[in-house]
Amino acid sequence: MDNNRDTTAEPLPQTGLPATEVHGTELPQTEPSEADLPESELSDAEAAVRIVPVAELHLHIEGTLQPELILELAARNGITLPYSGLEELRGLYEFTDLQSFLDLYYANMAVLQTERDFADMTRAYLARAAAAGVRHAEIMMDPQAHLTRGVSLETCVNGVASALATSQEDFGMSTLLIAAFLRDQSEESALEVLDGLLAMNAPIAAIGLDSAEVGNPPAKFERLFAKAREAGLRLTAHAGEEGPPSYIIEALDILEVERIDHGIRCMEDPDLVERLVADRIPLTVCPLSNVRLRAVDTLADHPLPAMLAAGLNVSVNSDDPAYFGGYVDDNFSQLKAVFDLSDFDRSRLAANSIHSSFASEERKAELLDELNRG
Ligand SMILES: [Zn+2]
């Protein structure tokens, strides 16, 4: 990591939540979980993968829109969708490539119109994620995807933030919000949106970079990340999903990110792997997403076991779970089925997710304690 941050810079206007101020710090008082039950009380499927407490670090809230909720929001907002009903919509979730996913992903966002819509979507994710063992979530949203269709920054940010504000009480999860920028749009557009977020004192802890990677290298957003860094925001970026290992190096050296989202193509560059291991750079890996978008052919071809063996700081995340076949628990259960992932590796992945989060040290200690008790 490059630590040449200019600490003499004048602080910019208040930017909302400092990274350490996540929503909620207390552990939930929950009923005994499945993990507390004796083995004999678990079904085969449940016994296959016990739920472990994890942090989810790579999650796009727009990617949690389930078909049922899309139809419900469309009806509520009087929006006519270009498909006849649930079955036809479900059928569209079989993707042939990244573009076929993005086409549906952006089309479905049309149902998100009001703060209530954004809040309902967020609460649905929190409920499902809590059942998957997620105890801390760092949630990306794409403000530009909403602004370009006429939904204001206030509507999308305040809607999501209103659900996150009570995530601890409602779901036993601490949360924070990451504003992600679309790398296939211009840096000017991103800078304008970041200005808007800072001006409204949006409760964001970090920025990210997502959408179509190839042809949109991290260096394109050098000024954006410099500005966010000066504003005290934490930094992460998608790199090395479909793009080459050099994009990961650019994200680290030019954007000075603390975390890499995906990063699986680092395995093509041994020197980069060595650097990522030495610096403990977190890689937020999304196995089922990689299969659905054909970054790997099958889960059996996924580099996660090799990444663990290399000593990389990897975690398991769901990316766009409504579109890619599952939430964090689904990712873990399929990994176990394909790789016979050991309990040790699962605990290691969970611990990595907690250590790699932007939560306060106090919150991390609570989560690690919960993990170690399990
Ligand atoms: Zn992603």
Image: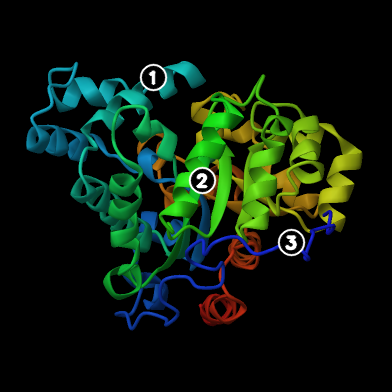
Query: Please, what secondary structure does the residue beneath circle 1 have?
Result: helix
Q: Quadrant of residue 164?
A: bottom left
**Residue at 64% of width from left, 64% of height from top?**
11
Residue at point 60%, 31% (across, down) = 187
Tell me if residue 82 comes above or below residue 325 in the rendering: above
Distance between the alpha carbons at the discs numbered 2 and 3: 18 Å
In-image side of 151 versus 35 (left or right): left
Q: Residue 45 at what x, y percent from top left?
A: 38, 54
Q: Residues within 10 Å of mark 3 (few under 14, many from 20)?
A: few
Q: Within 8 Å of ligand 1, the CB of disc 2?
A: no
User: Regarding mark 3 in the picture, which secondary structure is present there?
Assistant: loop
Q: Earlier in the sequence, mark 2 or mark 3?
A: 3
**Residue 129 position by quadrant:** bottom left
Q: Nearer the viewer, mark 2 or mark 1?
A: 2
Please tell me which of labels 2 and 1 falls first in the chain: 1
Query: How packed is label 2: few (under 14 Cα within 10 Å), some, or many (20 or more)?
Result: some
In-front residue for pair 153/235: 153
Mark 1 lies within 8 Å of ligand 1 (Cβ measured): no
- Which residue has dot 3 on it? 9
Which residue occupies 65% across, 48% down?
Answer: 227
Residue 355 vertical placement versus 187 (above, below): below
Identify the image quadrant of the N terminus: bottom right
The residue pinned by badge 1 equals: 103
Does mark 3's beta carbon lie closer than 8 Å to ligand 1? Answer: no
Callout 3, which amino acid? Ala
Q: Which residue is disc 2 drawn over?
A: 195
